[in-house]
Image: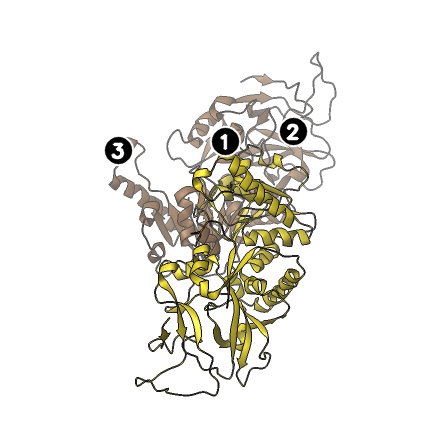
Chain colours: A brown, B yellow
């Protein structure tokens, strides 16, 4: 691990490499307060994350009067983090950059003008912001949202990108009442699991579509019976979370898809994070006048819709992007929702599987997040 | 032409064949007022309209106290009328039925309880209702909307299905202001022509997409230059109506579609009546957060949308169906809009090409409407 002294980017990269050095290596200015050196996942160009990222040590930076220095405790590897490093995400930090977008940390020191945070407080960046994959971050007070210190750190680290997406999607598009029903594909994703639990807490039923899957990671061993076992396990898991119905895509290869529902009302709201045929299945379940919200495209296939779905079935198709929402006037509202979600997590009412991994094992965690080692739980770096 | 006496359906088919006869051919009841016999386009089964329809004479029917007997003056052949006869339209009258859905007529006689209509008034069925392709219709007073007698009958006959669709689509989805812009495909359709003119009256610009077309009807003569001439004529026609920009689909086979627009703002609203690639072109023009409304599917191809269009471009896709809207609590509002549209037609501010054809030439008009004789103006039956 090299100790990096950033010169060329010193004035453009606030927070990470703020410390300016003169050409002879002597500090051009000094400050009363400086952050400790930070170990960080750093990349200078876009590309495959396992090829372009490296863990480096960066010098400490000045903590200005409105700044807060946070010692990071945990931060997840989300798919959107990977897309940002690959350069395929529409909004991404300028290069060079430190990876990561959400996480949780403890306040180490504060600038003289900081009013509402003190050393020892637990905070998350809210809205999430780039550079959480490092041991120390310095950012302005306004970036940080103080949270309860009895939150499990893996939930505190991951509460925004996935659970808040689930919560907002359930409330922002269609007014749902107890007894209503939603339908979603990609139901085993963390957003999917959160949707099931958050819906159930409001008395809302869920119809869940999962891909046909196998219980073996060795592809050569796959057979129809092993597929069923893998799917059955996923179904069991979702039902334990509160899912009313779980179907594999192949189970839905029937003419009358709604005939599979016995006591559930037709859903007015659907969620799509897959695209392709899986999105069409969500549309088939929707009732007249229903809305499908797209928030992901795991299959990398587009969404295809018949003309009559729009004209005669009056379906609406929308999209959801948390990043845009949180950069609007909704920030404070979202912070209240995050407190609510953390409360649910503390009470055990919101659960999803995660693996806490030491930061030193970053590259193994990255490989797992990239899917190189088969299906794995969400990887959360522990600093 | 046979004089048809309807027995089996007498109690189910109000208006057309209401007159009940006993088995010995003697009237089972009599009334003070009876409509004249009606010449009608009649079909007993669904199928190709030129095969299943025939013009028959039907007996007069009783005009009850709340009924109005209307002598029809004109009624168009709309594509949806054809779909209803084919049996492919999702809502259609039970069989046997008389064709047609909109039109204009003159009140011939009224029942004793009719309050707001008198013989000589001009009326249109509003919302449109089935059976306008006949010389005399008897329906309850509430069905009829009285219109100004100085309206051109071909516009009065066609004012609802196409122009009202255009007007409502311009106002129901996105709030537009003078200087804003819309984009549409299928711009040479009557709805498309109305959108151009109604938008222009509000100071709203229009970007119009048309198919590449040829000026010759003989397919063997088509060449690239003749295509251009046909397209150029269509462009000229639309620009005379007030179109700002008109592109053929092949002109839009460029990487930077918005680079074609010089002074126009990016449209927030788009209209699609084609589907397939033509719908994708509308989506490409839309600005971030824009809405595309589908009201037709002329290409019979579905609409395909990328995941990123929903998530990162925040596009909304909706549908519009006039029939559903008019069967809601919006009927009176729609009648006011129809009066407004007829006023525009009288002032020459709303124009589209039509061919008035004698009812006796129904089957020729139908062939033209079916596209058997090449591109033809809207066929309007004159009784």
* The label number, if any, that marks residue A15 in the structure image: 2
User: Can residue A363 be seen in the rendering of this structure?
Assistant: yes
Reading the image, the residue beneath label 1 is A82
Provide residue B172's location: percent of width, then percent of height: 59, 57
> Which type of secondary structure does the marked residue at label 2 adopt?
loop
Residue that appears at 60% across and 47% down: B237
**Position in image of residue B186 (x %, y %):** 53, 48
Query: Residue A321: percent from the left, percent from the top?
Result: 55, 43
What residue sits right under mark 3 in the picture? A221
A29 on left or right of B101: right
Query: What chain letter is assigned to the residue under label 1?
Result: A
Which sits earlier in the primary sequence, circle 3 or circle 1?
1
Q: Secondary structure at mark 3?
A: helix
Q: Please tell me if label 1 and label 2 are on a single chain.
A: yes
Rounded to the nearest whole Å, what is the CA distance between mark 3 and mark 2?
50 Å
Residue ID at (63%, 57%):
B350
Q: Which sits in the foreground, A233 or B273?
A: B273
Estimate how packed mark 2 is, as few (under 14), some (14 to 19) or many (20 or more) residues with alpha carbons within 10 Å: many
């Amino acid at each position: 691990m090299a100790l990096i002294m950033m010169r060329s980017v010193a004035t453009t990269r606030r927070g990470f490499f703020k410390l300016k050095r003169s050409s002879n290596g002597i500090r051009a200015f000094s400050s009363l307060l400086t952050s400790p050196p930070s170990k960080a996942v750093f990349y200078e160009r876009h590309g495959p994350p396992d090829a372009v990222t490296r863990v480096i040590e960066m010098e400490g930076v000045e903590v200005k009067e409105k700044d807060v220095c946070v010692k990071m405790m945990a931060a997840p590897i989300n798919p959107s983090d990977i897309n940002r490093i690959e350069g395929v995400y529409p909004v991404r930090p300028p290069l060079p950059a430190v990876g990561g977008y959400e996480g949780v940390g403890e306040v180490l020191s504060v600038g003289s003008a900081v009013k509402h945070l003190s050393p020892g407080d637990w905070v998350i960046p809210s809205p999430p912001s780039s550079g959480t994959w490092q041991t120390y971050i310095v950012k302005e007070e306004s970036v940080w949202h103080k949270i309860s210190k009895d939150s499990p750190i893996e939930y505190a680290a991951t509460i925004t990108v996935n659970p808040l997406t689930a919560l907002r999607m359930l409330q922002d598009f269609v007014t749902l009442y107890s007894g209503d029903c939603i339908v979603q594909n990609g139901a085993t994703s963390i957003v999917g699991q959160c949707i099931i639990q958050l819906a159930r807490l409001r008395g809302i039923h869920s119809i869940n579509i999962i891909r046909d899957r196998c219980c073996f990671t060795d592809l050569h061993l796959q057979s129809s019976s092993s597929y069923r076992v893998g799917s059955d396990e996923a179904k069991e898991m979702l039902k334990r979370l509160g899912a009313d119905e779980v179907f594999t895509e192949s189970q839905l290869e029937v003419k009358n898809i709604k005939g599979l529902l016995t006591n559930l009302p037709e859903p007015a709201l659907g969620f799509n994070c897959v695209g392709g045929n899986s999105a069409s299945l969500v549309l088939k379940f929707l009732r007249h006048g229903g809305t499908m919200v797209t928030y992901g495209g795991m299959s990398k296939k587009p969404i295809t819709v018949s003309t009559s779905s729009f004209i005669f079935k009056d379906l609406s198709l929308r999209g959801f992007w948390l990043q845009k929402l949180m950069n609007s006037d909704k920030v404070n509202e979202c912070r209240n929702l995050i407190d609510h979600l953390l409360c649910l997590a503390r009470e055990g009412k919101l659960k999803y599987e995660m693996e806490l991994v030491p930061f030193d094992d970053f590259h193994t965690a990255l490989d797992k997040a990239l899917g190189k080692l088969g299906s794995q739980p969400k990887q959360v770096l522990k600093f």
